[in-house]
Each structure stands twice: as C-alpha cells, then as structure tokens.
C-alpha cells in the first residue's frame, strides 16, 4: 500500500470525478429520482444477516455509488481490511494489530499476531467467563457472608462502560430478572453513590473494567467502592476477593489493587477499548444474559465480519454505509450524522456509537503524519424515536443543515411486554416509516395550499424534503441482531477511516486533558502554584477555591 498516494486523496481522479458528479447532479431531488425509477424503493436495498438495509432515500444514483466504490478502491480499503483480518499492525501509531474480529472468531479459526494464534486464548477467556457467569447466575458464587449475588456493579469508563451498558439495555428482555447490573463511570462521586446507596454489600459484586487499569476515574471509583464495601460489611481485605473481579490487560496493576488475578478476565492490546465489549469487558452482560445468549451475540458479530470480508463491493453493506457518509461529509458539507433507533431498548445505542465513531475517526492527521485536507469523522448524535420527534426533528425537517440519518427499527417488539399494551408497536413503527417518508419527500407549497392553509403560512408549513436516510429493519432485537448491528457500524467506521487515510484505532486526542487534570488537581486542593497555567484557567481555579471556602 502506498500511504502517500492515499494522503492526496482529494487529488485523485476518483475524488475529482465525484466532485464533478456532485456538481452535475446539482440539487438532485428524491421526488425526481423516484419518479424516474419506480423500482428504486425495492431495488436500492441490501440484506446482511437479519438486517434489511434500505438506501433508496439517499441523494445518489447508480453512477454516484459506482464512483464512490471507485474511490474506495483507489484508497485501498479492501487491502487494509484484509490486513486487519490477517492481524497486521494497522494501528501504526501504537504499533498494534486491530483484531476485534478475532474476539468472535470460531474455535477452529487461526489468526496470528507475531506468529502466535490468538484464537485459543480468546476461547479460553470466553470459557472462563462462562464458568464464572454460570456460578454467579446459579447462586453458587457467594459473597463474603455467604449470600448470593443480586447486583453486579460494573465500574469502567469509555469502552469499558459504554459497550456493556448499551448492550445490557438492548438485551434487557433476555436478562435474568433476579439479578441486576448497574454501571458506574463518572468520577463524580454522585455516580457511585446513587448506584450503591440502596444495595446490600453482601449481595453486591463489583466488576472493575479497565483495559489499562490506570484510568483515574475507574481506579478512583473502584477504591471508593472497596472502602464502601469493607466499611459496610465491617470486613477486612479478605472480603475483596469475593466481591471484586477485574477485566483488564494489566495483571500487575490488578494485583496491586488487591484483586486476585485468578478473578481477572484478560484481553489483549490488539482490542481497542471501543471495540471491546465482546471481549472480557462484556462479563457483566454475560452474567445478565447468560453465556449462551452472549455466544449468539458473537455469532451475529461474526456473520457481519464474514460479510464485510467476502461480499463484493456492490453488495457490501458496511462499505455502502461508509461511502454514503463520505458522500455527504466530503461532497455535501454535512457535519453530523444522526442515529435514531425506534426501540426503547436501544436507548444507549447512539451514545455507544459516539465513542466508536468519533474516537475512531475524529482525526486531522493522516497515517503518514501529514495534515489531511478533507473532512473526516462526523458528529454522531441522536436518541431513540419517537422522543426525538418531539424535540429536535424540527431542525432536521426544516432547519438549514443537512443531517443524514439512520433509522433502525424492528418488526416485532422484543419481549412479552405488559398484557395491557394497546397496539403500541405498530404505532411506534408507523412513526418510523412516516418520518423517513416526510424527510425524503416533504410537502410542497401546492400541497400545503391544497390543505387550505392561509397563504402567509404556506412557507412555514412547507417541507423541503430531500433529507437523506438509511432504514435498517430487522424482525426482532435479539442478541445476534445486536451483534450484527454493532459489527456493521464497526466496519462502516473502518471504511471511512481507510478512505480518509487516518488511524481509526488510536486516540491521542484524549491524552492532553488527562495530563492537565493531573496537574491542576493540586491547585484545587492545596492552592499549589501550577507552572504554565494560563491566566483564564488560573482565575477560574481561584474562583473555585473561593466558592469552596478555601
Ligand atoms: O479501559 P480503560 O483502559 O480504563 O480505558 C477507558 C477509556 O479511556 C481512555 O481515555 C480512552 O479514550 C478510551 O478509548 C478508553 O475506552
């Protein structure tokens, strides 16, 4: 691969061809595209596993898609994909392989990093997790006083929180109702306080999730949790082993904390934090849904991995979704991307995707160290419909910004919900379909007039339409479908990072704030002089101390 040639992405003929095509298309109207091709609705769809993906409501023609695929080919996306699956060190700034796909590889697969097959280790940890999860679920694992565990508290942040927290919500219908899981991430003590205040410590298991085991928020919360537990139980250090387990790549730090490394579930530096909830980081989820359903979820991931690895460009769904994002971000100046799940269970889905996408592709320097000269990752945002409809959809429909959106919905409600529900799922999904229709086709001034609107209100009641959306529809939100969805977004993000020639697997941008926080803390507590503190921050620190009466 030639990194230099990718750096000058916007000088490549494939890029120029897309820019020219964009100009020629001008303000292409979805109404016109559908009028010109009545088969578009059914034709612009792809299937991957259980996911039906409709991309007909995009501002694209066959030619657009062809040109986008050519751009991907010119950027060596598939070569980089193959290098990732082979275990090559494509995270160049950290000199690491990128092998979250190995976390869901089948037992007999062979994937080597530095000449060693990593798959047996992955399955050994999964088996160990399954054994532990079964013991907790059955009540065989007891706390220090002999009581069974009723609540699991996962303490972690970023990738060690968002994934399991999102998936626990998503799969709540599949959880053991006798056991609940809570998640603590914020270094604000209020988070831990609210999570444990009504718990019986004798029935509580803390899972300390941290890839590095050095993350200050997590170690601080874990230390406070240990203090709480030992004080409440009036127990000594021995009690820790029955109430604390760790998920980490760092056995030394785990044992320094006082957790028996026999109760540590390991993963590896080739798993990025935001790609890790299908590793040991998913232990809380596995305890909640059971090992079998966790494995079904892994099967879902693997299904989409295989699709991404083998499907031709024309039917490769992650490639398509990645390229559509590039079309809007690089050729229409779209700045953001909304993800709008029509499932209450996916309430944390977009928050999870924010880390996946924005920490991966929020970069402005290419893999060769040169500044990129094109837009990279979008701002990802959104909450579940229909709540968003009553809040910010106004701006999507009638504001001045182009906001491409993904709509995710399901034909069946997940669980046996309350018996008294009055056809709520069809109502939810009626909104789902109606919104993408309204966004795409809008309402013309003539249509508004025909409804008898007063002339002065016509411009206010007109909907321009032409707001592009992808619809992802599946029968039901099962563990496998969740795995499929996450893998789909992981690979979409991969495609975009590959085209933009950035390292999607490092996260140097989070470091500076951490270093400065460490430096500022003594100024808050002791009023220490912090060398190099700027005047604005110095004044704010002084104000803070004054407000705290220091
Ligand atoms: O799992 P940990 O090592 O505690 O890291 C937790 C999180 O914090 C870091 O600052 C990174 O930005 C994230 O990528 C990571 O997921």
Image: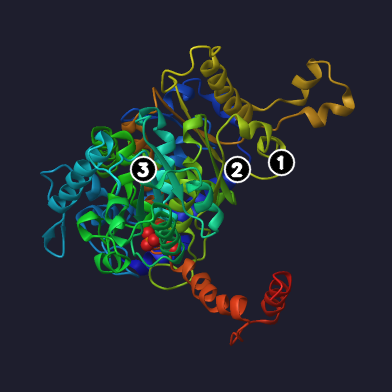
For label 3, the residue is: 203
Nearer-the-camera pick, 524 or 356: 524
Disc number at residue 403?
2
Residue depicted at x 41% and y 32%: 172
- Residue 101: image x %, image y %? 26, 48
Q: Say whether residue 8 is left or right of residue 315.
A: right
Q: Earlier in the sequence, mark 1 or mark 3?
A: 3
> In the image, ligand 1 is in what quadrant?
bottom left
Q: Quadrant of the N terminus?
A: bottom left
Earlier-in-chain disc, 2 versus 3: 3
Decide: is 342 above or below 25: above
Most extreme residue toward the front is 234
Q: Quadrant of residue 501?
A: bottom left
Which of the pair 308/56 is nearer the observer?
Answer: 308
Q: How far apart, in angstroms, are the residues tagged by discs 2 and 1?
A: 10 Å
Q: Foreground residue, 377 or 216?
A: 216
The CA span between labels 2 and 3 is 47 Å
Tell me the tag on residue 399. 1
């Amino acid at each position: 691969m030639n990194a230099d040639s990718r750096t000058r992405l916007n000088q490549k003929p494939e890029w120029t061809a897309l820019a020219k095509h964009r100009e020629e298309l001008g303000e292409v109207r979805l109404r016109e595209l559908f009028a010109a091709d009545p088969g578009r609705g059914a034709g612009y769809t792809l299937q991957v596993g259980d996911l039906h993906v409709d991309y007909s409501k995009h501002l694209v023609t066959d030619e657009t898609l062809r040109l986008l695929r050519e751009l991907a080919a010119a950027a060596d996306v598939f070569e980089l994909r193959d290098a990732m699956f082979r275990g090559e060190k494509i995270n160049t700034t950290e000199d690491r392989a990128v092998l979250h796909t190995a976390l869901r590889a089948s037992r007999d697969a062979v994937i080597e990093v530095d000449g060693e097959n990593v798959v047996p280790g992955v399955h050994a940890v999964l088996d160990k997790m399954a054994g532990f999860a079964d013991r907790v679920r059955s009540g065989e694992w007891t706390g220090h006083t002999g009581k069974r565990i009723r609540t699991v508290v996962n303490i972690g942040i970023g990738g060690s929180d968002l994934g399991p927290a999102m998936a626990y919500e998503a799969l709540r219908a599949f959880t053991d109702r006798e056991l609940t899981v809570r998640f603590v991430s914020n270094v604000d003590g209020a988070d831990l306080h609210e999570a444990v205040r009504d718990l019986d410590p004798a029935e509580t298991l803390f899972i300390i999730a941290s890839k590095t085991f050095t993350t200050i928020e997590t170690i601080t919360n874990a230390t406070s949790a240990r203090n709480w537990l030992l004080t409440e139980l009036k127990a000594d250090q021995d009690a820790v082993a029955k109430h604390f387990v760790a998920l980490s790549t760092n056995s030394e730090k785990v044992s320094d904390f006082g957790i028996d490394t026999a109760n540590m579930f390991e993963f590896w530096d080739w798993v990025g934090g935001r790609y890790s909830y299908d590793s040991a980081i998913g232990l809380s989820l596995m305890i909640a849904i059971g090992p079998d359903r966790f494995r079904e979820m892994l099967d879902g991931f693997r299904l989409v991995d295989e699709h991404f690895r083998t499907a031709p460009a024309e039917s490769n769904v992650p490639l398509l979704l990645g390229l559509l994002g590039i079309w809007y971000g690089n050729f229409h100046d779209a700045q953001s991307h909304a993800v709008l799940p029509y499932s209450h269970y996916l309430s944390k889905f977009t928050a999870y995707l924010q880390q996946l996408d924005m920490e991966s592709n929020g970069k402005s320097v290419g893999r060769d160290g040169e500044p990129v000269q094109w837009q990279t990752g979008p701002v990802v945002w959104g909450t579940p419909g229909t709540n968003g409809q009553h809040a910010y959809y106004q701006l999507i429909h009638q504001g001045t910004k182009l906001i491409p959106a993904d709509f995710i919905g399901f034909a069946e409600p997940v669980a046996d919900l309350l018996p008294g529900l009055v056809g709520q799922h069809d109502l939810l999904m009626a909104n789902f379909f109606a919104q993408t229709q309204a966004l795409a086709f809008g309402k013309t001034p003539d249509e508004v007039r025909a409804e008898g609107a007063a002339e002065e209100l016509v411009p206010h009641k007109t909907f321009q339409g032409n707001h592009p959306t992808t619809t992802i529809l599946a029968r039901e939100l099962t563990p496998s479908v969740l795995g499929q969805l996450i893998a789909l977004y992981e690979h979409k993000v991969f495609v975009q990072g590959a085209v933009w020639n950035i390292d999607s697997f490092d996260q140097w941008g989070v470091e500076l704030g951490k270093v400065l926080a460490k430096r500022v803390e003594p100024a808050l507590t002791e009023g220490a002089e912090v060398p190099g503190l700027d005047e604005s921050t110095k004044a704010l620190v002084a104000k803070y101390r004054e407000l705290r009466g220091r």
